[in-house]
């Protein structure tokens, strides 16, 4: 259902890597808020803006504008590869999975710093 959603919505707003990696395949305008994705490769569908209401609203309006949408025609997803499926299948078939690879470990930075982070 996620792919269908990307194909039917007018804009994505947030700071998800999906805005940089998947949304470009749908020529979907993205307003990327904050610096979480800073430095990552992106397509022309992404508008980067600071985490401030007075910056987000104009970026969102720009993303929804016909002028901006016209600039996306013919855009290319920098993360798209023609043989991606076969590469993934080959990698999964040749990789021996173990417990360490299957469990995501959480690191409590507040404990190591000896302070509360808010």
Image (spheres, helix red, strand yellow):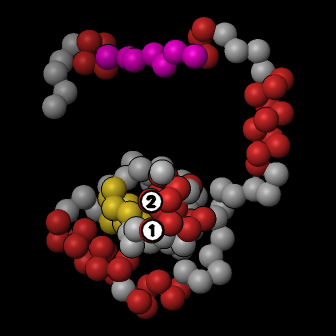
The quadrant in which residue 13 appears is: bottom left
Q: Is residue 52 left or right of residue 2?
A: left
Q: Is residue 49 above or below residue 111?
A: below
Residue sitting at x 48%, y 19%: 104
The residue lying toward the viewer, choosing from 116 and 106, is 106
Residue 99 percent location from the top left of the image: 60, 8
Q: Is residue 95 left or right of residue 3?
A: right
Residue 80 percent location from the top left of the image: 69, 58
State the SS at label 2: helix
Q: Which mark is residue 8?
A: 1
The question of residue 59 being in magenta is answered with: no
Residue 15 showing in the rendered view: yes
Region of the chain picked out in magenta, as a range: 102-108
Inter-mark Cα distance, 2 to 1: 5 Å
Q: How many marks on residues?
A: 2
Alpha-carbon neighbours of circle 2 within 10 Å: few (<14), some, or many (≥20)? few
Residue sitting at x 79%, y 35%: 89
The question of residue 104 being in magenta is answered with: yes
Alpha-carbon neighbours of circle 1 within 10 Å: few (<14), some, or many (≥20)? few
Q: Is residue 70 above or below residue 61?
A: below
Residue 39 showing in the rendered view: no
Residue sitting at x 39%, y 17%: 106
Q: Is residue 86 left or right of residue 105?
A: right
Q: Which residue is mark 2?
A: 5
């Amino acid at each position: 259902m996620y792919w269908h959603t990307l194909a039917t919505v007018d804009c994505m707003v947030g700071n998800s890597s999906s805005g940089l990696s998947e949304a470009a395949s749908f020529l979907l305008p993205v307003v990327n808020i904050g610096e979480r994705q800073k430095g990552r490769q992106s397509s022309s569908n992404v508008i980067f803006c600071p985490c401030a209401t007075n910056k987000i609203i104009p970026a969102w309006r720009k993303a929804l504008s016909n002028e901006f949408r016209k600039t996306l025609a013919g855009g290319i997803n920098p993360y798209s590869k023609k043989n991606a499926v076969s590469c993934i299948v080959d990698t999964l078939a040749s990789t021996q999975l173990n417990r360490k690879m299957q469990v995501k470990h959480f690191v409590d930075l507040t404990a190591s710093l000896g302070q509360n982070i808010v």
